[in-house]
Image: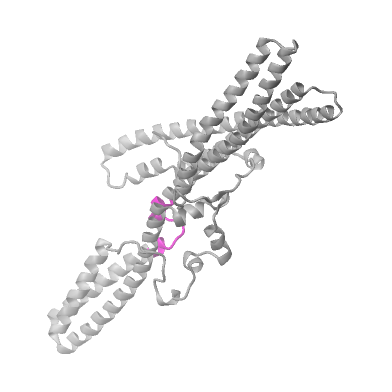
Amino acid sequence: MRKKIYKNVFAATLLINMLCLNVFPSFAQLKPSQPSEAGMTQAQLAGYSEEEWAKLMDNKLEYDEIYDLVKNFNPDIKRAWGTYSKSVENLDRTLDEISAARKDMSDYLELAKQDGDMELMMLYSAQIKGLDSVKKSMSRSGTNLKKPVSKMNAGIRIATDQVTSAAKNLMISYKSIEEQEKILIEMVRLGESLVKAANLTKAQGMATNVNVAKATTDYLSAKSNLANIQANKEKIRVSLIKLLGWSETAQPEIGPVPEVDKAYIDSINLEEDTKKANSNNTSLVELRNGRKNASSYENELKDASETAMEGTLKNEMNALYNKIKEDRLAYEASASAFEAAQISFNGANKSKQMGLLSEQDYLMQNFSYVRKKSEYESAKLQLLTDVETYKAAIAGNLSLE
């Protein structure tokens, strides 16, 4: 019996050492990890309803799906969350193994007592205390690991938020370019017609070289801008879809971005938002967490750094808020100008139908309408970008370098 007992003592000691080293296996692909999960669908394993999962798995990118797409399909983020989930599962199994090992030690302790073997009694008692200590520590870790938001998963959550923010900005940029492309295509078409009309009216003695030169300059400018935009559009599209787990050859439909949330802008409380940004900022959190094992002199330096960084954060939050206010004014002005241009263009359409407006004047009205629409769309997407950047800063993703 003694040989068997010593073998189990060694196994218990090895188990304790492994637990102290926090040894966990690497991430595996999504599949059942325990008997109770056998037969579960991919949606159930991922924690979604079938409808939610089907929506994520379709070939359409929706703005409000970006966080879930990042978490589940961005290769690096998916791997990190997979490793974290596997750690939780392994911890539960390990706690079961500790309980089983402790029961064995308790049984061996009783046998040693019956044999009157003091040496083994002391050895088993020490093993039981070690297992109890490890189980208590691991139980605390398990409680923290299972919390949706905890220090244990802070790094992964921050990385997920940062990639999500980057993807949102890319999608806004893509839709901005897509909108500009549509408008520029129309402007090139109108510009070409205006050049022809200007040359025709000049030949008729009703226009000058200045009129022709201006029409030609506007046309060539629109054509050049269109070429530049089309060159960048595909690069942004590929960057966006790869960030969300698609291959660069995939052709997902990219849905619309949301309208500007005026109610959110009206409800902004800069002072409270700055406090939240201060508490959440990744650089400040890292600095504060580094105090635990630092010397008093090192902490003095950290105090000075923290004060400086908090000042920078406050200034940056003020700048972001002021930009929202400025760009909102620009957005509202462009919306008013676009509305007026729509009214004028509607009037131009009626006048042309009644024969009261020349082709060239009609084209000029159309050109003005398209330009105002372009300015409105650009202002809208810029304001949306401002709001998303502000939200990201509150979440802790504001660089203080």
Number of marks present in the image shown: 0
x then y, percent, for residue 215: 65, 19
In depth, the one of 70 and 54 nearer the eye is 54
Q: Is residue 133 magenta?
A: no
As drawn, the residue found furthest toward the bottom would be 114
Q: Is residue 127 left or right of residue 390?
A: left
In depth, the one of 387 and 214 nearer the eye is 214
Quarter of the image for residue 192 reads: top right
As drawn, the residue found furthest toward the front would be 203
Residue 111 in view in this figure: yes
Q: Quadrant of the N terminus?
A: bottom left
Residue occupying the point 84% across, 30% down? 353
Please tell me whether residue 340 is drawn above or below residue 72 in the rendered image: above
Quarter of the image for residue 375 reads: top right
Please tell me whether residue 317 is drawn above or below residue 17 in the rendered image: above
As drawn, the residue found furthest toward the right would be 354
x then y, percent, for residue 235: 46, 39
x then y, percent, for residue 282: 41, 43
Residue 379 in view in this figure: no
Q: Is residue 279 left or right of residue 196?
A: left
Q: Is residue 156 magenta?
A: yes
- The color scheme shown is one colour
Residue occupying the point 52% across, 44% down? 168
Q: Is residue 88 left or right of residue 241?
A: left
Segment colored magenta:
142-157
Residue occupying the point 29% across, 71% down? 132
Identify the main secondary structure in magenta: helix
Please tell me whether residue 280 is drawn above or below residue 32 in the rendered image: above
In depth, the one of 357 and 121 nearer the eye is 357
x then y, percent, for residue 401: 39, 33
In depth, the one of 14 and 82 nearer the eye is 82
Please tell me whether residue 60 is drawn above or below residue 99 in the rendered image: above
